[in-house]
Structures are given as structure tokens and as C-alpha cells.
Image (cartoon, rainbow, N blue to C red):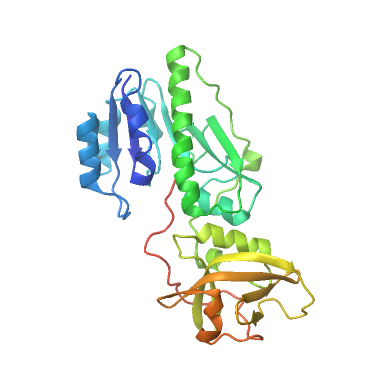
Amino acid sequence: MKIGIVSNSATLYMPLLPPLSNYKAKAGLMLYVGSSAAPENSAPETIRYCNAAGIGLTFEHNKADLYDWLQQHDIVFFSGYGHFVKAQYLEQLPLGAYNIHFGVLPQFRGPSPVFWQLRKGGHEIGLAIHVLTDQLDGGPVIWRQNIPNQPHYNYDNIYQLFGQLQVQGVLAILNGINSGNKLPLTEQNKSLAVYYPRPELKDVFINWQEMDAAEVMDIIKACSPWNIGAISLINGQELKIMDASIGLINHYSYPSGTIIVNKRTFAVMCKGERLLNINFFKMGNNYVPARFAGAYGFKSGQSFVSNTPNLAPTTAKTNPNLT
């Protein structure tokens, strides 16, 4: 069995290489690395690993290269390839082509499912492997796994965890084929389908008037660390909240977005009259523990802006990985 992996992110393809390179007495593994400016991609490191493990390696120079490459395989798994692939070229693969999607389907279709699952704050998050078709993230699902959404998870945590979970799914599919008991396909319920685009400024900006403390925590988790936290604005300056915790319901009657500062704490009133305790934030080029908020000019009674500003955020150089 000749197995192919197509990906544009080392974060996604590296976990797949060790188990698949030795699958069934080295059935034959080839890696196709799509063009990407992602900083975690290291061509020399990938070349060294593939040469040592006997893995065929192709770097994309032109998207048309992919269609010729596909014909060399029996089965292909896509994990984070950022371009549309024509299904007519996939139908020629004897054992099919599958996309590894780091989101629950059909509820979280689109290029940034990890961000949106954390942003929406559900009790569970998940990933799915589905047949690759002309409909974006719309093919029948062959394998899925959901996990509890833990308080300590953030964007990078989930990518690392899902990077390992995808291996379980790929091996389950291959084992099913080799045993003659292929995993069943489940058609997606189109009535539940929701497509989420790449996050924009409004999606990473905290609206204190509309969000309760739990919703603010969700957006912080979704924005860390790739965006260096969730964005807020005060006195014309951008502040990014990197870590926070929910306080108790209290007796304060301040409007949502109001800051409450003392010698050791930096808190903000949220919708529902619950305080959010800011533990760590970034302002300009400074990474600041909450206990020093007063030294940066914050005073009780000041308020964060709730409406999305008409300016570009000072975000990290890399946006969320796409699957």
C-alpha cells in the first residue's frame, strides 16, 4: 500500500510520519509539502528526517505538481493543505483521499476550526476525518473523536493534542482496509452545517457590553498564543489579555468594561456583574503581570472600549493553522 500525506504545516505532518513510515513493514510513505510561509516549517529538518526514515519527499513549486504526485499512491491523507483540490483527480486513487479536519463536522466547517471551537466555548471539541470532495469539508465522515474542552486548553494545546489524535484516526482507517473491514462512512447532516471563516479583528476583540466572563475566557483561549491574547482597547491603546480567571459574583454596580485595580489585582466588570481577574497582559512591547497594572497607569473607574475599533490589530505574524 502506497500512502501519501499532503500538508503545508510541520506541526501537522510530523506526528504522522513516525507511525506511518513503519506501517505494515514499510508499505511505502511519501510526503508532499505544500507551499507555506509558516515559521514552524523547516525544510532542512524535514529533509533530514525523511532521508533517514526512507520517506519520499516532494516540496511544492506549482500547485499543478500535486495532481501528478497523487497518481503515485493508493491512499492519500490531507492535513492542513491550504488549496482547493479538484475531486476528479482524487477519484483515481484506489483507496481514496481523506481530509483530516481539526473540528467537529458538520458544525465547524471552514479553515480555522480550532479557533472557532474554543471561541464558541462548547463542552466538547473534536476532529473528524472525511472523504475529500468538491464540497469544502462536506464529504462523508469515516472517523471522528471528541474530547472534553478543558479550562487549561488554548489554541496551541489543541493543535498539539489533535496532532496526536489524528494518528489514531489514520491508523484506524488503514487497519480497517488491511483487515477487509473498512470503517463505515457517515453522511453529514446538512441541516447542522455551519461554515466559519478565518478570524477577523471583530472575532478576537472583547466586547465587554455583550460578553460575560466565561465568553471572555473563551476568546482568550482561542487567541492564545497565536494572537498573543484577546484584544481590548483603552485610552486609544491596544491591550491584549493573555491570561485571566473568573472571579465571584460581587457587590459592585459598575458598568461592564469598568476596571477595578488594587495593589495586587487587575479586574474588569463583565456582563452579568461578574469580575474577570486579568493575570497577565501585553501592552505595546511589554508583557505585564497584573500586579503591576497600577504602574502602567491603570486606575479603578476607567473603562475598556466595547465597540470594535476601525484599526488593524497588532497581531502575531502567523494566523491560525488551517485544517
Q: Kindly indicate the quadrant of the structure image that contains residue 167.
A: top left
Say whether residue 151 is left or right of residue 285. right
**Image coordinates for residue 70, horizontal then vertical, percent:** 30, 30
Q: Residue at x 55, y 33 (%)?
A: 144
What residue is shown at x 65% (from left), y 72% (from top)? Answer: 208
The image position of residue 232, as x and y in percent, is 55, 74
Quarter holding the C terminus is top left
Q: Which image quarter holds the N terminus?
A: top left
Name the residue furthest right: 251
**Left or right: 26 as drawn, with respect to 232:** left
Picture residue at 48% right of the left edge, 43% below the top: 161
On screen, residue 217 versus residue 137, left or right, reads right
Q: Nearer the viewer, residue 169 or 150?
A: 150
In the rendered image, the vertical position of residue 163 relative to residue 287, given as above or below: above
Please determine whether, in this image, residue 165 is positioned above or below residue 311: above
Residue 8: percent from left, percent from top: 33, 45
Residue at point 51%, 49% (across, down): 114
Between residues 230 and 113, which one lies in front from this camera angle? Answer: 230
Can residue 83 be seen in the rendering of this structure? Answer: no
What count of labels does the image hold? 0
Q: Nearer the viewer, residue 108 or 321?
A: 321
Q: Is residue 311 above or below residue 95?
A: below
x and y percent of residue 282 in the render? Answer: 47, 73
Q: Residue furthest top?
A: 180
